[in-house]
Image: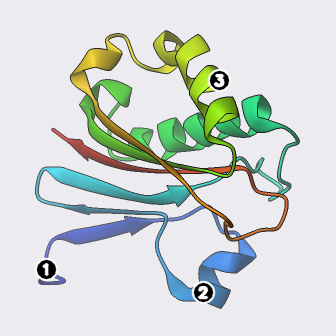
């Protein structure tokens, strides 16, 4: 991928520099959002699957807004979850809180044995298009 006409966004979190990555990258009409976790603006991870997942989607919305996009631009999400049952229940219960029509988003949920932080329960990556 050429660097020309490619823009990147971040939250200014320490791990962005330590690990070395962008939270979101736009090239052409597509935005790729790196796996997001349920941290607040201070970088503190919230407790519990519901709180983490809601904050994760809030962080995704913030990144999309920087490209004048909304959740309606999302075409694919991949959810990585430490507890598939809990993640499925939470996602099912508030899917319309973040997507007007969740059936327009390709979604994959994958159970994992570990994530970046020991207390992290969920991570979500997104692809959005104009």
Helix, strand or loop status at disc 1: loop
Q: Distance between the residues labelled 1 and 2?
A: 23 Å
Vertical position of residue 97 compared to residue 2: above or below: above
The reply to whether the C-beta atoms of the residues labelled 1 and 3 are less than 8 Å apart is no
For image coordinates 27% across by 29% down, the residue present is 105
Q: Distance between the residues labelled 1 and 3?
A: 39 Å
Vertical position of residue 80 compared to residue 117: above or below: above
Residues packed near mark 1 inside 10 Å, few (<14), some (14 to 19) or many (20 plus)? few
Q: Is residue 37 visible?
A: yes
The reply to whether the C-beta atoms of the residues labelled 1 and 2 are less than 8 Å apart is no
Q: From the viewer's perspective, is 13 left or right of 47?
A: left
Q: Nearer the viewer, mark 2 or mark 3?
A: 3
The reply to whether the C-beta atoms of the residues labelled 2 and 3 are less than 8 Å apart is no
Question: What quarter of the picture does the C terminus occupy?
Answer: top left
Helix, strand or loop status at disc 2: helix
Image quadrant where residue 59 sits: top right
Image quadrant where residue 107 sits: top left
Q: How far apart are marks 2 and 3 (CA)?
A: 29 Å
Disc sitting over residue 19 in the figure:
2
For image coordinates 57% across by 28% down, the residue present is 88
For image coordinates 54% across by 17% down, the residue present is 92
Disc sitting over residue 82 in the figure:
none
Disc sitting over residue 4 in the figure:
1
Report which residue position mark 3 lands on. 90
State how the image is colored. rainbow
Helix, strand or loop status at disc 3: helix
């Amino acid at each position: 991928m050429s660097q020309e006409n490619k823009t990147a966004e971040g939250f200014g979190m320490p791990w962005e520099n330590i690990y070395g990555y962008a939270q979101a990258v736009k090239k052409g009409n597509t935005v790729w959002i790196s796996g997001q976790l349920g941290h607040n603006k201070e970088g503190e991870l919230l407790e519990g699957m519901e709180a983490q997942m809601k904050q994760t989607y809030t962080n995704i919305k913030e990144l999309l807004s920087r490209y004048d996009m909304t959740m309606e631009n999302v075409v694919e999400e991949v959810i990585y979850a430490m507890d598939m049952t809990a993640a499925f229940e939470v996602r099912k219960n508030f899917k319309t809180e973040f997507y007007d029509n969740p059936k327009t988003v390709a979604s994959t949920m994958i159970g994992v044995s570990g994530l970046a932080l020991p207390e992290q329960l969920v991570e979500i990556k997104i692809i959005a298009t104009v």
